[in-house]
Amino acid sequence: MPAYISLVNFTEQGVRDAKNSINRVRTFEKALEAAGGRKIAIWWTLGQYDLVVITEMPDDQTAARVLLQTAMLGNVRTTTLRGFSEDEMESIVQGLA
């Protein structure tokens, strides 16, 4: 299943309600599972981003839908990267000339 690394920042609304951050993550995990995905890890961080979230989802469309649904709640904004495993990268580079 494709992996995604999301760099997450709280919006002003999200910061005002930071005490509910754990509950919001649990709601996100339920939405993720309902879409056929799974959480690999979530870390709250210091620095440029407030959280780093690593997930697996069935495909890019599902990832976009789950992330848009989450963003529509108004608490976070995300920058998401598609990650490739070592096996996936091995297959990719084998096709290089």
Image (tube, rainbow, N blue to C red):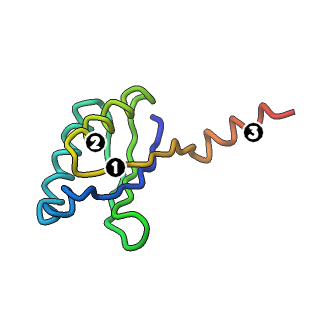
Q: Nearer the viewer, residue 17 or 82?
A: 17
**Where residue 89 appears, x then y in whole percent?**
66, 42
Task: Determine which residue is flagged by label 1.
Answer: 77
**Where residue 15 appears, x then y in whole percent?**
21, 63
Q: Quadrant of residue 1?
A: top left
Q: In the figure, 8 relative to 82: above or below?
A: below
Q: Amino acid at mark 1?
A: Arg
Q: CA distance from mark 2 to mark 3?
A: 34 Å
Q: In the figure, 95 relative to 5: above or below?
A: above
Q: How many marks?
A: 3
Task: Determine which residue is flagged by label 2.
Answer: 71
Q: In the figure, 25 relative to 93: above or below?
A: below
Neighbourhood count class around disc 1 (C-alpha, 10 Å): few under 14, some 14–19, many 20 upward:
some
Q: Amino acid at mark 2?
A: Ala
Q: Quadrant of residue 32?
A: top left
| Residue that lies at the very extreme toward the top in this rendered image | 61
Residue beneath the point at 53% across and 45% down? 83
Task: Determine which residue is flagged by label 3.
Answer: 93
Q: Secondary structure at mark 3?
A: helix
Q: Quadrant of residue 55?
A: top left
In the picture provided, is 55 more to the left or to the right than 3?
A: left
Residue beneath the point at 70% across and 35% down? 92
Label 1 with label 2: CB-CB less than 8 Å: yes
